[in-house]
Image (cartoon, grey):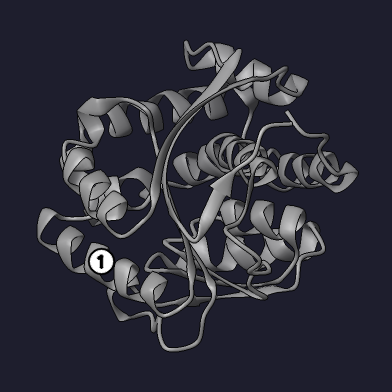
């Protein structure tokens, strides 16, 4: 994995101080198990915001899944470059930004200003806090992905861990909007879990992206988690010695170090 900025560790420490002021580690562990169960066993409720329904689950997301998403996108961003001679886009549109981790990770590698969009008011506030802590030029707004304007101004458009949580009827329109944005000069990156059970739509999206000149990649990233993340990993019965993801991209190319 590419070296992480020192401010990543500072962000983790600040988030722990912020959330553990009101939760014990045992309570946080229980909340993380409940959150993980929601992602695995109650996926039908994700679109309703069930994953972030309690203060404990919001803390667990901020202290565990947000940092994991940062680590994944940071590693992927370190291996992706603009296709051809096109420079990285100066504006990063982060759809379904959550706590802001994905957009911040991309900006940490390639630079640029992040515009985050999410429907959850807590996530929007948290994303603003994340940008401040990581010293990223960025802001977040409460706007659903379907209403975010993607054209005609070229940008880097991120959809990280978003598409698998959308209602089925919203996926195809978003796919067409992403393809249109790429055709008009944007660089597009979709990041999703590698597990096929949560992405039954993947093959159709892959064919559409490849027809448009894009690429599909799978990523397996060895990682030595920071101690706080390692402890939470164990408390949830997980074992993240390797981070995995799959991506679809347009206007970007994978490079080997």
Decide which of 209, 202 is in the foreground and name it.
209
Q: Is residue 87 visible?
A: yes
Figure quadrant of the N terminus: top right
Q: Is residue 46 visible?
A: no
Decide which of 57, 27 is in the foreground and name it.
57
Figure quadrant of the C terminus: top right
Where residue 175 appears, as percent x and y from the top left, is: 25, 62
When the figure is inspected, residue 192 is found, relative to residue 231, above or below; the finding is below
When the figure is inspected, residue 134 is found, relative to residue 76, above or below; the finding is below
Quadrant housing residue 106: bottom right
- Residue depicted at x 83% and y 38%: 9
Quadrant housing residue 120: bottom left
Where residue 127 appears, as percent x and y from the top left, is: 60, 63
Quadrant housing residue 130: bottom right
Secondary structure of the residue carrying tag 1 is helix
- Residue depicted at x 57% and y 16%: 242
Taking the view exactly as shown, the residue that stands out farthest to the bottom is: 152
Count of all numbered marks drawn on residues in the image? 1
């Amino acid at each position: 994995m590419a070296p992480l900025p020192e401010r990543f560790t500072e962000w983790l420490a600040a988030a722990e101080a912020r959330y553990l002021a009101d939760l014990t580690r045992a309570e946080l562990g229980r909340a993380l198990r409940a959150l993980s169960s929601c992602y695995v066993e109650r996926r039908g409720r994700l679109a309703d915001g069930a994953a972030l329904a309690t203060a404990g689950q919001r803390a667990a997301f901020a202290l565990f899944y947000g940092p994991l998403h940062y680590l994944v996108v940071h590693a992927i961003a370190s291996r992706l470059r603009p296709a051809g001679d096109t420079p990285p886009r100066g504006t990063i549109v982060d759809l379904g930004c959550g706590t802001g981790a994905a957009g911040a990770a991309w900006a940490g590698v390639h630079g640029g200003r992040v515009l985050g969009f999410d429907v959850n008011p807590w996530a929007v506030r948290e994303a603003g806090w994340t940008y401040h802590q990581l010293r990223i030029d960025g802001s977040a707004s409460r706007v659903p992905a379907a209403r975010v304007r993607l054209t005609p101004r070229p940008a880097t458009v991120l959809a990280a861990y978003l598409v698998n949580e959308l209602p089925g009827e919203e996926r195809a329109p978003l796919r067409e909007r992403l393809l249109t944005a790429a055709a008009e000069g944007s660089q597009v990156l979709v990041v999703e879990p590698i597990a096929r059970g949560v992405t039954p739509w993947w093959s159709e999206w892959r064919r559409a992206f490849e027809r448009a000149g894009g690429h599909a990649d799978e990523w397996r990233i060895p990682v030595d988690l920071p101690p706080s993340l390692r402890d939470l990993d164990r408390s949830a019965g997980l074992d993240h010695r390797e981070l995995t993801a799959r991506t679809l991209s347009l206007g970007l190319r994978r490079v080997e170090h």
